[in-house]
Image (cartoon, coloured by chain):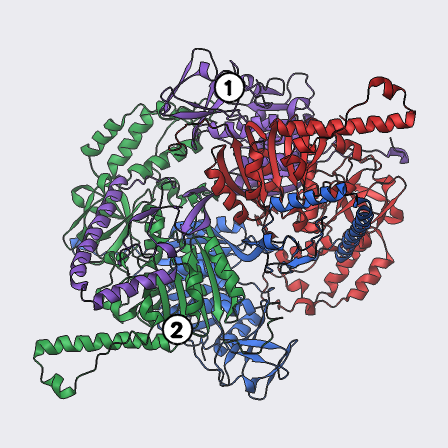
Chain colours: A blue, B purple, C green, D red
Amino acid sequence: MSIIQYKDIIEEGDLVLIYINRSQLKPITIRKGDVLNTRFGSFPHDSMIGLSYGSQILTSKGRGFVYLLHPTPELWTLSLPHRTQIVYTPDSSYILQKLDVVAGSRVIEAGTGSGSFTHAFARNIGETGKLFTYEFHEARYIQAKKEFSEHGLDKVLTCTHRDVCKDGFVVGKEQINGDAVFLDLPAPWEAIPHLEKVIAKDRRVGICCFSPCVEQVMKTVEALNENGWTKVEMTEVSALTWESRKEMVREVGDAIKRLKDVKRRQREGIEQLKKLKKKEEEEREEEEEEEEEEEEEKKKKDGEIEVEHASKKRKYEKQPKEKDRDRGYNPFGKGRRVAEGEEDFEWFDVSKNEREIKTHTSYLTFAVFVPQLTPRENGEIK
Amino acid sequence: MSIIQYKDIIEEGDLVLIYINRSQLKPITIRKGDVLNTRFGSFPHDSMIGLSYGSQILTSKGRGFVYLLHPTPELWTLSLPHRTQIVYTPDSSYILQKLDVVAGSRVIEAGTGSGSFTHAFARNIGETGKLFTYEFHEARYIQAKKEFSEHGLDKVLTCTHRDVCKDGFVVGKEQINGDAVFLDLPAPWEAIPHLEKVIAKDRRVGICCFSPCVEQVMKTVEALNENGWTKVEMTEVSALTWESRKEMVREVGDAIKRLKDVKRRQREGIEQLKKLKKKEEEEREEEEEEEEEEEEEKKKKDGEIEVEHASKKRKYEKQPKEKDRDRGYNPFGKGRRVAEGEEDFEWFDVSKNEREIKTHTSYLTFAVFVPQLTPRENGEIK
Amino acid sequence: MSSVHRQEVIGYDDWAILTLPSSATKIIQMRRGGTISLGKFGVFKVDNIVGYAYGQSFEVLEDKEVQPMKSISYGMEDNSESREATPGLDFQSSEDNRDLLDRGSENQKITAEEIEKMKKEGSGNEVANKIIEKIIQGHGSFDKKTIYSQEKYLTRKQKKFTRRFTVNSLTTSNLLNHIRKDRDPERILGLSEETLGLIMSHANVMPGGNYLVMDETGGLIVYSMLERMQGNGSITLLHENDQPKLALFRHTNYTEEELSEMVKPISLLEFIDPKGSRSSFVPLPEEVVDGMSEMRKTRYLRRVKRVRQVNATLDMVEGNSFDGLVYVSTINPVTFVPDIIDRLKGSRSFSIYSQYKEVLLGLNHILLRDKRVLLPNIYESRVRKFQTIPGKVHPLMTSIGGGGYVMSGIKVFPKEGAVASGRRS
Amino acid sequence: MSSVHRQEVIGYDDWAILTLPSSATKIIQMRRGGTISLGKFGVFKVDNIVGYAYGQSFEVLEDKEVQPMKSISYGMEDNSESREATPGLDFQSSEDNRDLLDRGSENQKITAEEIEKMKKEGSGNEVANKIIEKIIQGHGSFDKKTIYSQEKYLTRKQKKFTRRFTVNSLTTSNLLNHIRKDRDPERILGLSEETLGLIMSHANVMPGGNYLVMDETGGLIVYSMLERMQGNGSITLLHENDQPKLALFRHTNYTEEELSEMVKPISLLEFIDPKGSRSSFVPLPEEVVDGMSEMRKTRYLRRVKRVRQVNATLDMVEGNSFDGLVYVSTINPVTFVPDIIDRLKGSRSFSIYSQYKEVLLGLNHILLRDKRVLLPNIYESRVRKFQTIPGKVHPLMTSIGGGGYVMSGIKVFPKEGAVASGRRS
């Protein structure tokens, strides 16, 4: 199979991405007799063969399940361990768009890194184009080369173990003729002078350099200018993912009605008893709050903060709609707890970021190289 | 009057901000006998005296009107011509918050510039604090000093004509004891060494340097470190203003119904005539579109682009709600035009940015200076 | 693959985009022997630019001639590549702006009429330099500006008067930015370049795929997909009128024939009722066709072809055979997307675009509960551009607002009886 | 002005915020003779830090002693101010990472137990350095990292083990960031420091003003306004239960009395029906009061004072006398804000906060049509922080999401008969 060509039915030897949950995607290669073990249960590979991509499969007891996904460059990126250096989709999709990487493009990439962007390049250029990717870290090179083979990319790309800053990009006698260049290197300015030998000479060539620090960009801009690249443009992509949430519609009228009710009861003289009860309740609440605080303190393990993931469900105080308003709610507003989006209540559709958001990956420095053709030497079109 | 103390009734000599429209705020000083002329009509100052701030007044013919606003630092900022260098509210409000500028603070500001931020500082510190502001550009200094007097800020601030980078901040024999410093200078690093003489020695002092370029920040960071400032933090404020708009809810069912209608008419054989008509219409439309394009081309005045302001109303194609669906709409979807938010239609509440948004003002570099007190020399608390 | 359109060298009859020093853009067609007018930036002959690589810059000379330039900003201040080439303007500058008054145009003594007159007097880039020189002389307080302000002022004036242009090919990005910046962003529903990139990547658009598309941008989405696929694969284009609206293609290098090879139009009505929309046309026996006159035969065969195409498209719909969905339409996706999902193959991705996040929110809530969809997420992407003049690096002070939002997800086949809990942990 | 609370020097009984090298924070109170435990960062005596300026940093030594430090990061790698003071760690580094494997914790040979043991063996900051040294020795491929990665690694470890802290005063910003980063942002409805600043400036909060306030953050908004006003002006606090919820004040330097001097609570019910909420209490004649027992008199006078306060607050409501509105509540502003507008004086500003833009949109549409309001705008402000290590300047890779939105506007008095068109041009 190939990651850059869809197929419909899962066969032995296929790469399948197992969707376990929102944050867990596990790549496996289908082998008869093998078994996939997850914390939701075991799934024999044999049961996957012959199914359509996208199928859900259950454990024998029917308690746990996973989905069998066709790999795509974007899903492959999600499946990689986060500690690896990865060019994520907001950056990669913009670079592909701006460098105009399409079917037939000839792309130069250094370094290969985790190979995540390599997949997206390969997807875009297809079998009519060619990708040249370079990695100087040997272990990473071996790993990437193996993955590219397994993912059916051998026809589309050449992966080379090389320090391009020292040794340039020339590979054997192959004409590279790159029309798009991507440099994700600590010192792209050392690689830029070597590009002249491998970029196309008959058409416009685009480049993108990917560097986290401002100082790197400055050196890169200088090197680009010195080496004949023009239209130098430094950019930065800010990306956000939005969660859709429900926020309860609370009306001032309800709060006022509640207060009126309290007042009425006070007048009716039944307040004394309630007050005692309320006080107890409040004290309990305070205690709970303090306990909660202490617990949080503990969690922080003496100063180190554990980031909570935002997906935990929020709870709302009961705030019934008009028709429910008579169903004896608590005058002190401490009703039963309501789950987010519960029916019988009104909700705003709202959007929210994750608790921790990515605010920087790298600066993208783009430029173009335009060969100065001479079609009308001697006044004639050549 | 004072811009930093509210009053209720307009009197002679007051500074009033005339609200003409969303983008026009005009400051005037009320003088008996004077007349304010706007393109919406003339308004004698005499008619304003004795009115409450916030009043709307009409021209004698009742056709045009303006509002009489009490100046605030934020409105004053909006009233300044855009070409002047201004610290806008998203930056100024964050700086005030982070530097903890409150009633009683002692603030050092250089340079004064348009004086817009000076007003916000003065508002926050009130009459129990003190502001020292410095401007090296003589004409600007004279203008600012005049405005500060007119705006009732003399008690709160001292405005000095001075190149602080050369001559420092010391003013006569006054003890400045600044606890917050704001530097909006081309080379803040030249002013930083002079601060030592004028900042408080018995408490933490905060500083914010305001510079548009990265290189300025780098030099500033270095100077802060060298001069004993700690907790150096470079930040940037991104601010957006959101317009609320209405987007028509278009349903796929309506489109399908329209298509069915067309098909039915086709079957009924009345299509031939319509087609002719339609073709004419389309051709007319194409022509119109081309004319429109040409007109736009012209507008660009051979390459210079005029930015359209986004407030122009959008038009929607008619898309009636269920109950209106029988009112003979045009099968080709070319009904009468509907204004945004028109009743009888369904609308999404949506939000939108302005066509042109501010994406950068300056980097804000914060730091603190903590005096190293020695309360327990000889093992005793002093 | 006749619909391959990668432009490398400027050729006759090509459509292309000119960029001026002010970064204004203009769509032109290279007609043999024709001339192109840039208004006050001059006039040049098409013949003079044919044969150069796309991306080439030129300076307009006299007699409609041009001089190829290394870049459009060569010799200008905001481009360090050619710092040494800056015309040796020698003016006094102040160490700071302290003596400069904020008087705006009051400082300028040269009038607009004088500039207009000068422009008519000469041609070529020399005029620009002369005008700039005059403007500086006319500027009452130019020598009171700092070198920094002087440079900024010069750059602004140079951009305004320099007679240069770059010829760019009609890539999707160039086309999009032309519409978004110089025409009206609303024409393409506010779509930005970075958001288009997101749409394409999240829908996994690639050569060889068969995609279902709603395109209310006048054809920009179709254009983008054609560019990426280069003749390999198919686009089934849903339209809500009697035919798709692809006005944008009028000024591109695609012919009707090339378009029809890759793009299969289908109306919403045909899409929701594929069975009922099949043609009742029955092919005639071969011998009858053979016996037709040449003209009738041609007409007949064309009809056969059309019917086969429509039926093939309906087959794809009925077979739920699409490799992806790209939905860029103001039709409320809540009312339609859930119906489309079934038409996708398993494990295929979709991208739904809206200018407004609020419109996608409702759909997102629904798809979060739809077992046929995994990972329904709303994405936003915004690019900031920087000035990179050495010593003066900072983000651009302003840019175009908006850009839109993308919701993507993956089509899956849920199994009856699977426990819903634990699915989204 | 008893409610003035600007902290300058660390004093007994003060509440303050400690910051650790990891930037975790902790609220403490300085009890005379007490000790404060920082868990694995050590223990110190309160007496040892009293008298220093707020903002002072310390290193924890043995016997609960401390050593004042110029800054918390003094001597650490990410702080260029003390580059020369970096402990002379002398390790081999690689020119690049080419030989380093991505094996995560596999590379580390020192165990967690060993580290724990070392921590117990010593005290003072020496331990931290020893641990770090050990960790480096135990790191199988430390010398294969680049200098850059080595530095990053060291900084991370130093932050984790260095026994230092800074004593910060309880400013609103410090309090807000403590809750937002180390507790739960939801407790303050997701409010960020920059958005709080916007709220305050757009409502023109200043000493001497009389403000109407809704505060669902446990008191952070009230705290912020008190800090800005420093005892000058008043806060009329609307509450939806029988009393305002100001839990946050339990750990601050304000006493109940100080609070009650500036903060006037009023329930929603009293607010919407000020007439009906007036006490029917009639003061007794002076001679009767004079004749009371001391205890009864005190009780009586307290009651008089309370009634007068409530009536004064109701007077402000009835007199439409507020200088501004700060609305930070989950009660849908659409259902309440239009009723409040009348209670503001002319040309006064308001700030309405919501965590969600969608909630403000509906209100904005209504106020755009409300002639009593000018310039109803929705603002968003987000701060990005940067790393400023020389040679490695870049925005921080992650930060906390959200921060909320502010709608502000100005109350005006429309004139009957004014033509609506042309008002918002």
User: Compared with residue D375, is residue C318 higher up or lower down, i.e. above or below?
Assistant: below
| Image quadrant where residue B375 sits | top right
In the displayed image of the protein, which residue is found farthest to the right?
A: D293
Q: Which residue appears at 62% of the width and 38% of the height? A: B366
User: Compared with residue A179, is residue D158 higher up or lower down, i.e. above or below?
Assistant: above
Taking the image as shown, residue C324 lies to the left or right of residue A331, namely left
Q: Identify the residue under disc 2.
A: C322
Q: Residues within 10 Å of mark 2 (few under 14, many from 20)?
A: many
Which chain is indicated by disc 1? B
Residue placed most toward the observer, C186 or C384: C186
Q: Identify the residue under disc 1.
A: B51
Q: Residues within 10 Å of mark 1 (few under 14, many from 20)?
A: some
Q: Quadrant of the C terminus of chain A?
A: bottom left
Label 1 sits on a secondary structure element that is loop
Q: Position of residue A228 (x, y in %)?
A: 37, 52
Q: Amino acid at mark 1?
A: Leu
Question: Which dot, 2 or 1, sits closer to the camera?
Answer: 1
